[in-house]
Image (spheres, rainbow, N blue to C red):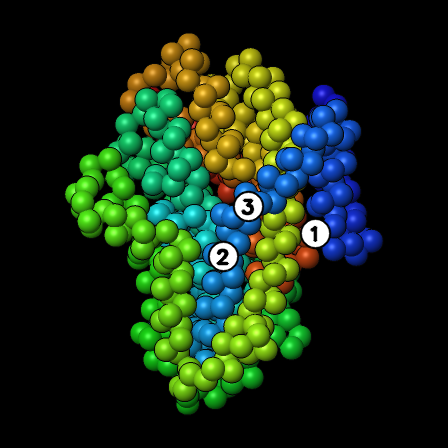
Amino acid sequence: MWLIVLLVLAIAFIIFATAKLKLHPFLALLLTAFGFGLLAGMPLGEVVKSVNDGFGGTIGYIGIVILLGSIIGSFLEKSGGAWRLAESILSVTGKRNVPMTMSIMGYVVSIPVFCDSGFVILSSLNKALAKRAGVTLASGAIALSLGLYATHTMVPPTPGPIAAAGILGADLGLVIIWGLVIAAIATFAGWVFAVTVAAKVDVPPYKEGEEPTLMPSLVDAPSPLKSLLPIVLPILLIVLRSIALFPTKPFGTGVALQALDFLGQPVVALLIGFFFALLLPKKLETSMLSGSGWVGEAVLAAATIIIITGAGGSFGKVLQNSGIAKMVGEQLSTAHLGIFLPFIIAAGIKTAQGSSTVAIITTAGIMAPLLSPLGLDSDTARALVVVVIGAGSMVVSHANDSFFWVVTQFSNMDPKTGYRLQTGGTLVQGLVGAIAVWISAAIFL
């Protein structure tokens, strides 16, 4: 139980240090990572290695994606492209429906795209929509975040659900069908949370000095189609890569597969998006690409996000290597909770160590030998178990989750607001997803 107590104390320290002491989140997370490791009794060398591996692994995965996404966002904002897109979208959906628009976008985009990459890509559009609609940035940001999270954790081809389906012997087609249905219900719950809770929290779309100076004049802004390309093209390439890598290999195993496998890597896809972003200004000047120009400003803005995200990765890695996830899983696996058992195990592991993918795969391994004794060994039951594990892996996103820091830093939220909205939203959405699976199991099993 000491590890659980230690985790609670660690989270409390992060909130206190950032909210009350005004400590930079990077320092708060780094100190917490070392403190947790030492107090948990980990070998000293293992603590240092975990901090370094967690930071490097997280940055290696998402660092360049954040940088390129920030640069694309800068070009969209400063050229007026994001504002042109915002006007076009709002003319169709209406100013009152920004959260619904972002929920739907998140739900669709995160089926093939990792949720953090999707949030980075769509962040500039969300800011422009919030500004043009005159609403708080928090409502659209949380709607987008929760929409992304729902399909990321429940619907293949993201790695977690695919791995769980394989471990549990579930039919991938059934997992996709049930995942889409339950994720839609969860996304609806996320949208309700966004419009009833997040919409009441005043978060400005742009920090002081950050807002583009071109508005309200849109005379020189690019067309909506031209503005859409740097956002849609990377997403399309990532989607095509996911389809190409399906076990059926719909594009064959030759040159087409190799090309899509390369072009659909998030780093490569966003680099291509960057080149299309260069077409957005009415006249591209070399000064825009300099250290003091649009690129330089975007890199500086992204640097803070990257180091905070990396520190969150360090904290998460220390938690993983402390053995807390295994301990939580073993303690909960003896409970008699039916279809709620995999949900609670996944939620416990997710909350303890931060990674949804680790929570999904670990829970699937624990549940595999328990399916028959629990009467969950039919095709439909196995698929529902995969989906309910995904729902559990959302509960909850907090300081040890890199996605928490991507959402809060790209949305101008301090950690305290992030805990209220991102952590609270993932709790609501995960619970609704689990209840939806329980009702489905009662009807179809």
Q: Position of residue 52 (x, y in %)?
A: 63, 41
Q: Residues within 10 Å of mark 3 (few under 14, many from 20)?
A: many
Work out whether mark 1 precedes mark 3 in sequence or the reverse, and give the earlier one. Answer: 1
Q: Residues within 10 Å of mark 2 (few under 14, many from 20)?
A: some
Across and down, in percent, residue 195 comes to: 53, 57
Q: Quadrant of the C terminus?
A: top left
Front label number (2 vs 1): 2
Quarter of the image where one finds residue 439: top left
Of residue 105 and residue 194, the one placed in the foreground of this image is 105
Determine which of the numbered discs, if any, sits on residue 58 in the image.
Answer: 3
Vertical relation: 25 (above or below) 290: above
Residue placed under numbered mark 1 in the picture: 26
Decide: is 212 above or below 106. below
> Does the rendering let one see residue 136?
no
> Going 37% across and 22% down the picture, which residue do you hit?
168
Left or right for 153, reference 52: left
| Residue 324 drawn above or below residue 216 | above
Q: Amino acid at mark 3?
A: Thr
Specify the label residue 302 is tagged with.
none
Residue wearing tag 2: 64
> Which is nearer the N-term, disc 3 or disc 2?
3
Along the viewing direction, whichever of 199 and 277 lies nearer the viewer? 277
Identity of the residue drawn at 44% across and 14% down: 370
